C-alpha cells in the first residue's frame, strides 16, 4: 500500500528548483534546520555514545532521510560522518539534491523512491529521519510502519510535524500561508496534522517506543526556531527507539 499522495507531490514539485534558495518557498525549513539538527545530533550522541564533536557525531552510522527534498538535512548529516541515503517521491527534488551534493563534494545516495519501495531485507539503517513529511502522506500509520521496517533493532527514528491544535491552525496554516506568506498557499491541510499521542500509538503498534519529544517554537524577533520542551502546540520533533 502506497503512502504517496500525488497531489502533494505535484504541489511541492513546482518549487523543487528552489530547494536551496534560503529566501524562497522553503525558507521556513532552512530556518528550522539548525534546530532540528541540534535535537537529532544530541539524541544520536546520547544513544550511540558518540563524541560531542559535531563533525563526528554520526560517524559511520547508516542514516535514511525519508522525504529528503533537495537534501537540506542529508548534507549536514553527511558532514557529521554518516553514510546518508535520501529518498523522495519528487524526481525533480532528487535531481536538485544530487546536483547540489556533487557541487559540494558530498557522497550521498539519493533515490527517487517512496519509503515502501525499499526492501527491509537489503535496506536497514541505524537512524531514520522523517521530518515535515507525515502531514503530507496518505495513511500515516502505514507510513510509520514502513519507516520502522527499515530500522535496525535499537535504532533511532526521528519524526517532526505539526500538532493538530487551534494554535497550529491559526499560526501554522492561516498566518503562515495567507498572512505573512511564509510558505506557498495550500502547503498544509490542518486536518492532516497529527497529535503526539497519535504518533506514539503508531510507534507502539510497530515495536518502537518514544525516547524524547520537544516543541519547536518560532522566535519572531530573532526570526529563528528554538527547542521548547514545554510547548508542543505547533511544531514538535520526537525520537523513538526500535525495540530489539
Image (cartoon, grey):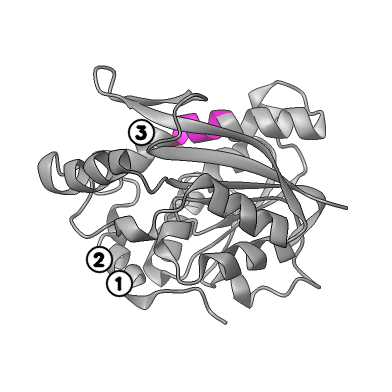
Contact, mark 2 vs mark 1 (Cβ under 8 Å): yes
Q: Please tell me how many numbered marks the rendered image carries.
A: 3
Residue 10 is situated, as x and y percent measured from the top left of the image, at: 30, 72
Query: What residue is shown with label 2?
Result: 14
Q: Where is the N terminus found, in terms of image quarters?
A: bottom right
Asked whether residue 232 is drawn in magenta, I would say: no
Describe the element under mark 3 as helix, strand or loop. helix
Residue 116 is situated, as x and y percent measured from the top left of the image, at: 61, 74
Task: Give the number of the disc on residue 10.
Answer: 1
Q: Which quadrant holds residue 37? A: top right
Describe the element under mark 2 as helix, strand or loop. loop
Residue 54 is situated, as x and y percent measured from the top left of the image, at: 64, 25
Q: How far is disc 3 from disc 1 in space, using C-alphas?
A: 24 Å
Question: What residue sits 62% from the left and 77% below the top?
Answer: 117
Q: Is residue 163 visible?
A: yes
Describe the element under mark 1 as helix, strand or loop. helix
State the residue in front, 54 or 165: 165
Q: How far is disc 2 from disc 1 in space, using C-alphas?
A: 7 Å
Q: Residues within 10 Å of mark 2 (few under 14, many from 20)?
A: few
Q: Is residue 27 visible?
A: no
Question: What residue sits 45% from the left and 47% below the top?
Answer: 161
Looking at the rendering, the stretch of residues picked out in magenta corresponds to 33-38
Q: Residue furthest left?
A: 179
Task: Give the number of the disc on residue 31.
Answer: 3
Q: Residues within 10 Å of mark 1 (few under 14, many from 20)?
A: few
Contact, mark 3 vs mark 1 (Cβ under 8 Å): no
Residue 52 vertical placement versus 98 (above, below): above
Contact, mark 2 vs mark 3 (Cβ under 8 Å): no
Q: Residue furthest top?
A: 221
Residue 207 vertical placement versus 158 (above, below): below
Amino acid at each position: 500500500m502506497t503512502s504517496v499522495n500525488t497531489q502533494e507531490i505535484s504541489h511541492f514539485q513546482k518549487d523543487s528548483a528552489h530547494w536551496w534558495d534560503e529566501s524562497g518557498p522553503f525558507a521556513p525549513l532552512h530556518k528550522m534546520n539548525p534546530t532540528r539538527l541540534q535535537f537529532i545530533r544530541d539524541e544520536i550522541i546520547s544513544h550511540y555514545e558518540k563524541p560531542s564533536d559535531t563533525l563526528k557525531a554520526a560517524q559511520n552510522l547508516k542514516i535514511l532521510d525519508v522525504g529528503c527534498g533537495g537534501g537540506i538535512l542529508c548534507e549536514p548529516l553527511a558532514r557529521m560522518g554518516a553514510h546518508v541515503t535520501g529518498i523522495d517521491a519528487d524526481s525533480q527534488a532528487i535531481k536538485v539534491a544530487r546536483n547540489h551534493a556533487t557541487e559540494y563534494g558530498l557522497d550521498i545516495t539519493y533515490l527517487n523512491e517512496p519509503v515502501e519501495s525499499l526492501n527491509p531485507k537489503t535496506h536497514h539503517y541505524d537512524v531514520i529521519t522523517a521530518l515535515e513529511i507525515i502531514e503530507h502522506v496518505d495513511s500515516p500509520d502505514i507510513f510509520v510502519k514502513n519507516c520502522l521496517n527499515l530500522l535496525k533493532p535499537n535504532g533511532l527514528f526521528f519524526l517532526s510535524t505539526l500538532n493538530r491544535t487551534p494554535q497550529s491552525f491559526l499560526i501554522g496554516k492561516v498566518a503562515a500561508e495567507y498572512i505573512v506568506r511564509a510558505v506557498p498557499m495550500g502547503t498544509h491541510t490542518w486536518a492532516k496534522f497529527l497529535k503526539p499521542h497519535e504518533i506514539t500509538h503508531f510507534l507502539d503498534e510497530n515495536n518502537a517506543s518514544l525516547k524524547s519529544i520537544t516543541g519547536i517554537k518560532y522566535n519572531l524577533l530573532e526570526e529563528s526556531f528554538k527547542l521548547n520542551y514545554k510547548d508542543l502546540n505547533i511544531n514538535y520533533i520526537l525520537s523513538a527507539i526500535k525495540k530489539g
